[in-house]
Amino acid sequence: MQVFEPIGGQLEILDRNEVDKIHAATMDVYKRVGIKVWLPEALKLFADAGATVDEEKMTVYPSESFVKDTLKRVPEEFSMYGRDPSYKLLFGKKRVHFSLMGQSVRVEDLDGNIRLATLRDVEDLARLSDWCEYIHHTSMMTTPSDVSQDAFHIHMLWANLKNSRKTTDGYTWSARWSSEDLGLAAIVRGGKEELIKKPLLLGFINPVSPLQISKELAEGGILWARWNQPVLYAPEALSGATAPVTLAGVLVQQNAEVLSGIMMAQLANRGAPVMYGTVSVALDMKTAACALGGPEAGLMNLATAQIARHYRIPCRGTGGNTDSKLVDYQAGIESALTLYTAALAGMNFIYDSAGALEGTLTTSYGKVIIDNELCGMVTRLLKGIEVSDETLAVDEICKVGSSGSYLGTAFTSKNFRKEHFIPSLLDRRTRDLWMAAGGDDIAKVARRKAKQVLKEHEVPPIESNVLKEAERYMSKVLKGYA
């Protein structure tokens, strides 16, 4: 399965001096406040490596030399492999990958109704992801309400693995959930050693702002590092609430939080694959909502990607988000701007690229289809304009002259598909033709397309012997929650 990886990073908003100032300010925060890590095992990792640790306060005070030495262990790039191991993603440099959104509680379903999500939705959305040409990673898009909340992590992972060949999310919450998800992934991959060699799962750790890593996520982060599964560290620091109101201050606090998690992973397993991430946005002072679709999200992506590259660490951002409740003009503005700024930033992994409504509280089937097309348009923008002897087309211009047409020439036929983005969903017909075809808006057209995909798209099944072993494992895990 060939994967095209567009290249971003064309836009930077900080100069080198400003990045250095953010680093220096972070080291000052470490010296004066430190970072709380609520797990004795993690504190011991820092202490054994030479960091100053106050066990009573459960706080680590890393020196600048400690930070620099520890970060040298981080790989500048790493690969992930789908359930189908021929599906490979390479993270690092300025390569850009798009992911579905994650962990909503509601769905806008195929008929446009808003309701609580079910396990069937998890399965169907994974199949949509498998079909989407421009979506690289299958996230756990929504949380099912019809399974035990103690065990939904394993239900969701199994639903994704059965219904998509791509890389997928896993849970890092607590040692128990982490080990159960890793155990299931090992069966699908063919054993723990194969999973370590060809990572399948992507873990998420959100440090608790301000300046804390929770016990449960520290447990998961250490375990995932030892299994060599990539983990992204991404605070959702809220400007004006859980972080300073100034965006520069958010960047300093976020840097302290992210680097602490990354260092913990490297102390647990030198060379463990990690990403430097952000979900940090402004708190809307009128509504107290997270402004995931706001321009501050775009600015944070641009600056965070630069800081990550300063440390030579692959990076994760968020884009494609909207605070709108409908697939409407607001959703279009916010989704397009946040996605494009994250891509221009050169974010290696852009979460929430497809399907998000209502600040990720709702997953929309139709918007998955629309956002797949948006990711295609952004991919085309990132390709830029090739300037070569052939593309300058001097011979073609002279051949057509001042009275001919380029329509239908061999040169046009040869090149138009690679030069032009050809939408499958966006409507460019005249109003008369559009009305004659029914005059449906894009939300309705997208839901209809989603229905068609779910009816027709077939995901190659898991091999029968692996399926049986995985189902026995699932039964054993679920009995532990009975």
Image: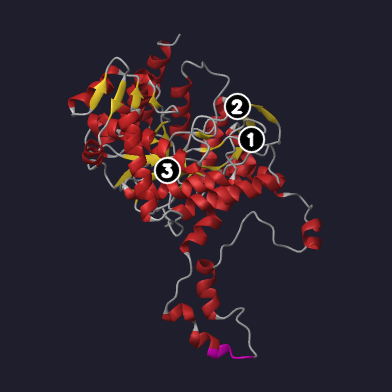
The part of the image, by quadrant, that contains residue 68 is: top left
* In this view, 54 is above or below 451: above
Label 3 crowding class (10 Å Cα cut-off): few <14, some 14-19, many 20+? many
Residue type (three-letter) at the residue carrying disc 3: Arg
**x%, y% of residue 274?**
33, 39
Relative horizontal placement of residue 432, taking residue 368 as reference (left or right): right
Residue where numbered disc 3 is placed: 316
- The residue that appears at 67% across and 33% down in the rendered structure is 286
Quadrant including the C terminus: top left
* In this view, 465 is above or below 93: above
Residue where numbered disc 2 is placed: 117
In this rendering, does residue 261 appear at all? no
Label 1 crowding class (10 Å Cα cut-off): few <14, some 14-19, many 20+? many
**x%, y% of residue 38?**
35, 19
* In this view, 102 is above or below 412: above
- The residue that appears at 44% across and 75% down in the rendered structure is 387
Q: Main secondary structure of the magenta part?
A: helix
Mark 3 touches mark 1? (CB < 8 Å): no
Give the magenta part as a residue range.
398-402
Element class at badge 2? loop
> How far apart in space, not on screen, are marks 2 and 1 (Cα)?
15 Å
**Label placed on residue 358:** 1
Residue type (three-letter) at the residue carrying disc 1: Glu
Q: Which residue is nearer to you in this view: 454 or 55?
A: 55
* In this view, 144 is above or below 284: above
